[in-house]
């Protein structure tokens, strides 16, 4: 499940709100063990997703680097090549 969480820092264009929320959702799913929480746990689950997303926003905006921003399309191609080498075409 956590394989879906992608690096969000130092990309051009920067990470979107949707990408940050999706990563936060995956993280909370992993921690809680719920893919979809029950009604009794839904409020706590949603609150956790929002709090993790807020922490991620603060982290990403606070980080600094001297490295040039990475290109999303180039990184996606590298990932596809690694996958093909690992699992075959």
Image (spheres, grey):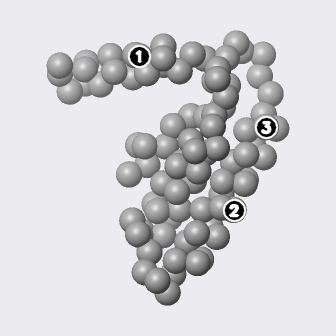
Dividing the picture into quadrants, the one containing residue 84 is top left
Give the number of the disc on residue 78: 1
Where is residue 33 shown, x and y percent of the image?
42, 68
84 left or right of 48? Answer: left
Q: Is residue 84 left or right of residue 37?
A: left
The CA distance from mark 3 to mark 1 is 25 Å
Earlier sequence position, callout 3 versus callout 1: 3
Residue under the point 78% across and 46% down? 58
The residue wearing badge 2 is 51
The reply to whether dot 2 and dot 1 touch (C-beta < 8 Å) is no
Q: Residues within 10 Å of mark 2 (few under 14, many from 20)?
A: some
- Determine the secondary structure under disc 1: helix
- Note whether 55 is above or below 12 in the view shown: below
Residue 27 in view = no
Q: Is residue 40 above or below residue 22?
A: below
Q: Earlier in the sequence, mark 3 or mark 2?
A: 2
Residue indicated by mark 3:
61
Comes first in the chain, label 2 or label 1: 2
Q: Secondary structure at mark 2?
A: helix
Badge 3 element: helix
Where the C terminus falls, by quadrant? Answer: top left
Is 30 drawn above or below residue 78 in the view shown? below
- Residue at figure coordinates x 57%, y 16% from the top left: 71
Q: Residue 66, which numbered label?
A: none
Horizontally, residue 14 falls left or right of residue 62, namely left
Q: Residue furthest left?
A: 89
Residue 76 in the image: x percent, y percent? Answer: 43, 21
Between label 2 and label 1, give the one nearer the viewer.
Answer: 2
Determine the residue positioned at 25% across, 24% down: 86
């Amino acid at each position: 499940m956590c394989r879906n969480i992608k690096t969000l820092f130092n990309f051009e264009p920067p990470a979107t709100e949707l990408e940050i929320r999706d990563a936060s959702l995956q993280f909370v799913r992993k921690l809680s063990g719920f893919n979809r929480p029950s009604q009794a746990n839904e409020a706590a689950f949603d609150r956790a997703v929002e709090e993790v997303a807020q922490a991620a926003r603060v982290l990403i905006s606070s980080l600094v680097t001297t490295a040039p921003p990475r290109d999303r399309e180039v990184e996606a191609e590298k990932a596809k090549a690694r996958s093909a080498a690992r699992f075959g075409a």
